[in-house]
Amino acid sequence: MTARVPRRSASVIDKLYRSLTNVPLWALWVFVVIWTLPTLSLLVNSFRSRDNQRNSGFWRVFGDENPEGFSVFDNYEVVLSTESTNGMLQSLISSLAIAVPSTIIPIAIASFAAYAFAWIDFKGRKPLFIATVALMSIPMQVALIPLLRTYLGGAHLTLPFSNRTLSLVPDLDLAGSTWAVVLSHTGFALPFAIFLLHNYISQLPGELMESARVDGADHFHTYMKLVLPLSVPALASFAIFQFLWTWNDYLIAATMLSGGDPDVIPTTMRIVNLAGDFGRTEHLLTAGAFAQAFVPLVVFFSLQRYFVRGLLAGSVKG
Amino acid sequence: MSDTLEHQGPAHTRFDADGPRRAGPAIGYLLIGGLVALLVIASYRTGQLGRLGWIAVTIIAVLAGSAALFIGGNKLVAQATVSWGRFRGLTGVVIGAAAGGVLRGNQSVRAILAQEQDFLVRETGTTPIDDTGLIELLTDFADPELLTVGTGLLGHAEWPIVGGVVVGVAAWASGALTSRLARCSVGVVFGLGAALLIADRLQFRNRPDVSLNTILIAAIVGAAAGGLVGIATRRHHLERALLGAAVGATAGAWLTPEMLGTGSARAAQFAIAIPMLLLALRVAWPHARSASQLANFTRRASAVVFLAPALGFLAVNLIIPAIRTLYTSLLDRESEQFVGLDNFRELWNDPASIDASEWTNMFGSQLFWIGLVLVGAGFLVGVSVRWIRDRQVGFERTSGSIGSLFLGAFIFLFAVFTSIRGTFINNLWWVVTVVTASTVLGLTIAVLAERAGRLESTAKAFIFMPMAISMVGASIIWRFQYQARNVTKNQTGVLNALWIELGELSQSGTARVVVLLVLSLLLAGSLLTIARRARSRTSFAGFTAVSIALLWLIVELYQRSLGGFTTGPNGEIIAETVLFREHAPFNNVFLMVILIWIQTGFAMVIFSAAIKAVPGELLEAALIDGADTNQQFFQVVLPQIMPTVGVVVTTLIVTVTKVFDIVKVSTGGNFDTNVLANDFFTESFSFLNRGVGSAIAVLILLTVAPVMIFNVWQMQRGDSS
């Protein structure tokens, strides 16, 4: 009897000890739960009625008593309906109208430049490349206001030492239009895109380029026939990165589009407007925010590998 | 950044190995198809199919136009090797047309053939005017902005056409003719002809009051400068002198006169013809290039064609605006008066930026003393471990010593940042907290996930997911977590619900005792583990931390002081919520949590790849040498991934410095949570103060400048090695 008790207690302590040394693995799952819970709570609440959202937390979802005729998609119905003053549907279209060209245009332009930096030998290539990539960390705020003014009234050059002005770009009336946002995104994305694509394109085998040149192909043909098809994975990585970036952007859109046509504002702006409207529509915010996050989440989960690769290949994006 | 390049190795081989061919495209197409279908349905429902079509058409038109420009540029360069004359001619057409367009577009010249109709521009719109006397008066003396000229399509196209033809033919001759005399003659004839045409059609208000002597002197000065450059570079002396003369003559003719519009017709002719002639001679003078020169030229020309779109965009969208911001930061709020550094001085002296008046509060803060004690403890642990192990005076890096030093410093900084307040301090606080927390958490999770086996990628995907959510969306998500409702109602935010729950627990009877017992048991287990580990000389830093936390919980619970409640006037217990977003200064930390939540996934992914790249042999060798987990991590893994830590930290610093969305959406910068980027937005758009707005933007630039310089330095070092 007396011998058994310490042994048993020792085994209890042993178990406790072992479970404690196993801390790391379940700590990982604690992290996972903490990281997922906020998003999950938003998702759950977006299916609950206004009263339920206001009366209890999302964890009480199974105790909900729903009013007559309530369906779980009601919030989404309202947010996405055509009559809705919140106009989330219009914004979804606007967001796409911004994100798609803002993804395609920089890819093309940056891949030209990345090819030139990697495979065309010209004087001052390295300093120019470093200078281009150094622009990556320039904060957008530094360029935003003058850029907005360019879109507002064209570009004019005031000649030095005199007060004479020469118009280089006429006023194209871009302010408040989707194109102002797209052009800004293109400019700001280029340093990172060039860096990312250069990393990849410069590592293509040199013999391939050499043999193309021997066959009489000039740079244009080498680029079109050889480099472009080979660098599709890198282009895809950047495309996903840039799509998420532009879809989720708020600062540029708010700068270029505020005070303009409410039909062209993207989802992020719409949600900020919705969030400013306290109380009355707060229950719609859950559905609205989730509708906004739905597209990037789908893109992210289905194309995660490319996203991660893009991140690894150019983890200096500001 | 060169360090990232080094890490490319494994990532790139994987790029090639399983590329996009496996399942990738299928999902991709499905996804794009689904999105397009969604888009069409959505636009149909909102009655915006037309808008959608219009957007698609413009996108395609812009892309096609850009593609045509790029391909055209390349074809043009390809012409150089086929026929030098044709290449020059085509280039001349493009340059001439552009020059003609700029001349006409700026209303510098009148139309050649087209009938001009003059309009008076008013704020409300344009009014056609027929009074020729008035037109003359306006054209000659008034502000050119007041008068625009409408001439129809021909009126807009004739100058570009004439410019293209004239410059094109002259340029073709300069490339195709072998005799220098013939080339120069053609150049002189066409240059003179174009100059006389421009001078004849020049608006009166543009005539410069300049003498022939001035132009000639300026041309000679320019020629001397060009010639000196030629001597310095030992090439093309005469060409450089000619170009210098042309530039000098232009500057002398158009920049020296005090004002335009008072000169004679003769002066205008000289002012245009002399630079034109010099330029034509410069183009016509050199002989055709040799084969090797031509190859060199084509290479440089294709580099220009490939780089021009990107560099052009960067110049117009980034560099020039940034320079303009630097300039406007020295001007007043309407960008009219030069005020020097007044905007910066105003920011610096504003107590909203830095308010150190209550810095002595620091010493009353618990955090201050906890931080100091932890730093001291970390130092003691490091020294004593080294002494016990090796009988040497030194500092041993273990998770205990490094951990508590680090944590102590971190907590100490919190004490500083909560006593000295202001926008600048908030920014600094954001950088310190988010960068440290995201890096440490990311590294921890990456190390933990290594052992998760099959479920590793699942776990990582969930941690990483917030990266896909916008900062606006993340702020909305966390707003619901932080929500505080009237205490008479149910709490809907999970954090306040837990906090009030805890408060009720610490006031309850039996439940409190049970929890106290469980906690004590856990503490006992933890202490036992420490004892065991101390005996076997393995690290017990983690368990020390856990024990201290448990002890704190037990004491708090024992004293009934844990959780959200307050005591009413009659001694009754009232529940009390935490106002996460409103209660300064710690509301800042709760906003930072949102960014940490987003950025930890980023740090984790980068670290995970770096850890996998640590060679297994290194770890094995360390194991054979008898290294424990601590030594393995601090002496093998950490040095190996140190460059990656650098990359993650610099990237995070750049991201955090610019943080805007979270603050804007969560508090709008109220409740003592303002940061530079939000201040920039408020000053620029709410207060319409361009000067101070630009100054703030410059400050943000200055904060990231060290990171930029560091990156450039790294890249240059990487290139040389």
Image (cartoon, coloured by chain):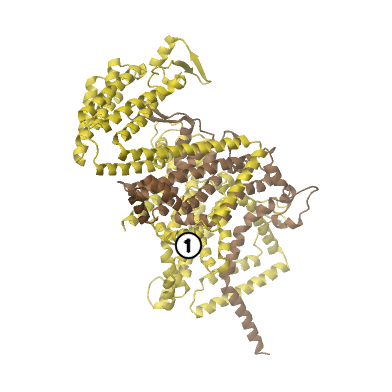
Chain colours: A brown, B yellow
Residue A138 vs B283, above or below: the answer is below
In this rendering, the count of numbered labels is 1
Residue B268 pos. (x, y %): 30, 19
Residue B392 pos. (x, y %): 37, 76
Q: Residue furthest right?
A: A68
Q: Is residue B502 left or right of residue A168?
A: right
| Rendered image quadrant of residue B636 | bottom left
Local crowd size for mark 1, using a 10 Å CA cut-off: few (<14), some (14–19), many (≥20) = some
Residue A247 pos. (x, y %): 55, 45
Residue B209 vs B29, above or below: the answer is above
Could you tell me which residue is drawn at 34 percent across and 38 percent down? B79
Q: Is residue A9 left or right of residue B669?
A: right
Q: Nearer the viewer, residue B268 or B49?
A: B49
Q: Nearer the viewer, residue A102 or A34?
A: A102
Quarter of the image with the N terminus of chain A is: bottom right
Q: Nearer the viewer, residue A106 or B322?
A: A106
Any part of residue B570 in sight: yes
Could you tell me which residue is drawn at 67 percent across and 72 percent down? B517
Residue B617 vs B476, above or below: the answer is below
Residue type, mark 1 in image:
Ala
Residue B29 pos. (x, y %): 57, 50
Q: Secondary structure at mark 1?
A: helix
Q: The numbered mark 1 sits on a residue in which chain? A: B
Q: Is residue A139 left or right of residue A20?
A: left
Q: Which residue is mark 1?
A: B609
Q: Residue furthest front?
A: A215
Any part of residue A137 in sight: no
Q: Nearer the viewer, residue A81 or B553?
A: A81
